Image: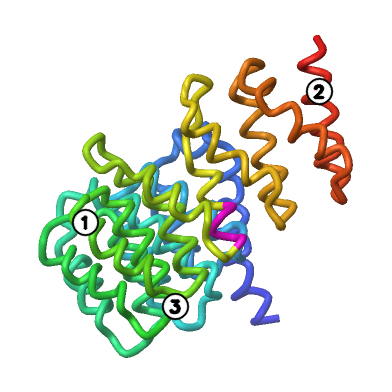
Amino acid sequence: MAKVILLQPRQRLLERARNYVESPDLFAENMKRAVRELIKVLPVADGPLRHKIMILLAGYAKDQAVEPLYDILKDEDQPPRTRHYAAVQLCAVLPFVKDAQSVIDLLEKDLVCPDPNLRRYATTAMGWQCKTPTFVLLTRRLYDDDLGVRLAAVNSLCNCGDARALPLLLERLEEAPLEEKRAILFNLWRLERPELQLSHIYKKYLADQAPELRLAALALLTFSHRDEESHQLIRPCLSDEDHRVRRLALERLMDCGLKTLGAFEQEIRQLLNDSNMDIKRSALNALKMLEN
């Protein structure tokens, strides 16, 4: 019976927490109390509820949310997904917190700690900080022994939007394993500046041996109905050995307008015999567009 009495307050607290996350009006009417109770219940809430609480606290109680989020990030007993989620919310919150230096100092220590999981979460959480000391620490994580840390570093450096990272990312693009190369390609656009001309990098990877990288490059290139050069880049993709590349090439071509589509009518007709049914259907639709 004693156990039931002990559990009842927690259950009531959890129930109120669910009500807060499901009813914005209720949360707004009782914000001070709600924030206190949500912070209190955060460590014991189940996964889905915990994630909703983190979002709510990050949105409306940034200063109070920092320490609880950091505690979850550090907690080895929490599921990896929950720790990552806390890191993402910290990244969103920290730029708006007046006195965040104490947590920043802790995260900078975590960036170089022996635990690769903690290095990964800290790297994610610091993906907003472009000040030179932290920026240098993040660039070093590009050469971490752990792939997960390196992937987090790619995302965080690009999230900062600091073009100083570009030479290092391009260096990694030459020598990194496939998954890391793909992550770099898909994140480079966040460093885009008129003077950088990233399109030449994507064009290079259209001819890469790895179909995953050809697919990424094709997805990232911007095609215009007036850009004849880009149209010629699509041409070999229509006969690529990987059906995903062929399908995406046809989709990109169909977005370029009827005039451009008409210039590829012969290649499109060949796709009517493609082994992939989705590509056959898309080719048929493209030809119908030309007929109309």
Q: Secondary structure at mark 3?
A: helix
Residue at which label 3 appears:
147
Q: Secondary structure at mark 2?
A: helix
Left or right position of 147 against 14: left
Magenta range is 211-215
User: Mark 2 or mark 1, which has the lower sequence index?
Assistant: 1
Count of all numbered marks drawn on residues in the image: 3
What amino acid is labelled 1 in the image?
Gln
Q: Position of residue 154 (x, y in %)?
A: 36, 63
Residue at image location 83% in from the left, 19% down from the top: 288
**Label annotation for residue 87:** none
Residue at image location 40% in from the left, 55% down from the top: 89
Spatial CA span between label 2 and label 3: 45 Å
User: Mark 2 or mark 3, which has the lower sequence index?
Assistant: 3
Left or right position of 89 against 274: left
Q: Residues within 10 Å of mark 3 (few under 14, many from 20)?
A: some
Residue at image location 25% in from the left, 43% down from the top: 196
Q: Residues within 10 Å of mark 2 (few under 14, many from 20)?
A: some
What amino acid is labelled 2 in the image?
Leu
Q: Position of residue 140 (x, y in %)?
A: 23, 75
Q: Toward the viewer: 35 or 216?
A: 216
Q: Toward the viewer: 40 or 43?
A: 43
Residue at which label 2 appears:
287
Name the image quarter holding the N terminus: bottom right
